[in-house]
Amino acid sequence: MRAIRMTAPGVLEQVEVPTPTAGPGEVLLRVGAVGACHSDLHILDAPAGLFPVPMTLGHEIAGTVDQLGPGVTGWSSGDRAAVYGIIGCGRCRACLRGAENACRVVPVGGIGLSRDGGLAEHVVVPASRLLHVGEIDLTQAAPLTDAGLTPYHAVELARDRLRPGTSCVVIGIGGLGHMALQILVATTAVRIIAVDTSVAALDLASRLGAHDVVQAGPDSVDRIRALVGPPPDGADVVLDFVGADPTVTTARQVVATGGQVLLVGLAGGTLPVRPVADEPPTVPLETAVEVPFWGTRAELQEVIALARSGQLQADVQTFPLTEAPEAYEMLRRGEIHGRAVIVP
Ligand SMILES: [Zn+2]
Ligand SMILES: [Zn+2]
């Protein structure tokens, strides 16, 4: 079968590999769709030794059950499923309470992270990683598993503060941000302020229900404060899906005293925390800063339910498998709107 593999650090190639077979407890899935994630670029760019090579990339997968390995029950050939990409150790405190995304064995294992992923015609996954998706189109189901799950988990962490009458600033209306907006609209009654550099992204944000949009620029902080109030007032929650120095700085300058900043994007920004009395604090007092990672299997089931009820839909741009390397280059150049989804 054809597969898109990292054959060496930084090298993504289309290669011919044997079709894998499902071992005990595993399922062979015919891949229907795979989302292209910024994390794949981080994996490609990572120094040698962090990730196995060669390895087929792709951790945002939906497909159709093809073959069952020995001992698998509850699934039949032809079932349509989304793949929960994380494979926690199953033994640590976090895994035992169902939070494999907080597994204490690092780097956490996963499909397309520690073993072959979905950028191929077939992929083998543990049966425990599959969730039924019903009639959702597979190009829609794939992005739910990361672009949908990650913001859903972040919103869950902020749920206590996302009460009617509060405000939430969402920075970065890309693959994850545009899903976050819909999750906020569907599950809260907060005022949503969307921030992005791109006019097209802000148009999408307005269509998806953002109450206000702010084009990022030198005056972002002033314009957001004009909407949410100046310190010590501000946004009750800030979701940063970029995570670069300028967005992290904006996040800490617009969050309210007692608010919450969630840094989801992995763009390498630094958030200084200095709670001292004789200098202006870098983060308002009583403010929580969190760095959510992906989500839990239970949350993925809820994300799928939201999609099945018609309240969550990914804005997708599809590519055939052969064009996967080009899709990643477009992602790197910031030319993808919504989510790039590869259809083998
Ligand atoms: Zn990802
Ligand atoms: Zn664990």
Image (cartoon, helix red, strand yellow):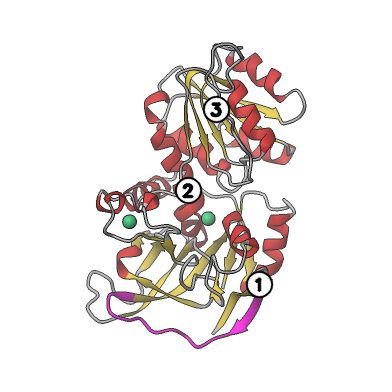
Identified at 38% across, 67% down, the residue is: 80
Q: CA distance from mark 3 to mark 1?
A: 38 Å
Dot 2 crowding, Cα within 10 Å, few <14, some 14–19, many 20+: many
Identified at 36% across, 50% down, the residue is: 296
Q: Nearer the viewer, mark 3 or mark 2?
A: 3
Q: CA distance from mark 1 to mark 2?
A: 25 Å
Q: Earlier in the sequence, mark 1 or mark 2?
A: 1
Chain part drawn in magenta:
11-26
Whether residue 229 is visible to the viewer of this picture, yes or no, is: yes
Place of residue 21 in the rendered image (x, y in percent of width and height, measured from the top left): 39, 84
The image quadrant that residue 317 belongs to is bottom right
Dot 1 crowding, Cα within 10 Å, few <14, some 14–19, many 20+: some
Amino acid under disc 2: Gly
- Asked whether 272 or 39 is in front, the reply is 272
Q: CB at mark 1 closer than 8 A to ligand 1?
A: no
Vertical relation: 69 (above or below) 75: below
Place of residue 172 in the rendered image (x, y in percent of width and height, measured from the top left): 63, 39
Place of residue 239 in the rendered image (x, y in percent of width and height, measured from the top left): 54, 34
Instruction: Please give the label number shown on residue 148.
Output: 2
The image quadrant that residue 272 belongs to is top right
Residue at label 1? 12
Vertical relation: 224 (above or below) 150: above
Amino acid under disc 1: Leu
- Left or right: 266, with 289 as reference point: right
Vertical relation: 340 (above or below) 114: above
Q: Secondary structure at mark 2?
A: helix
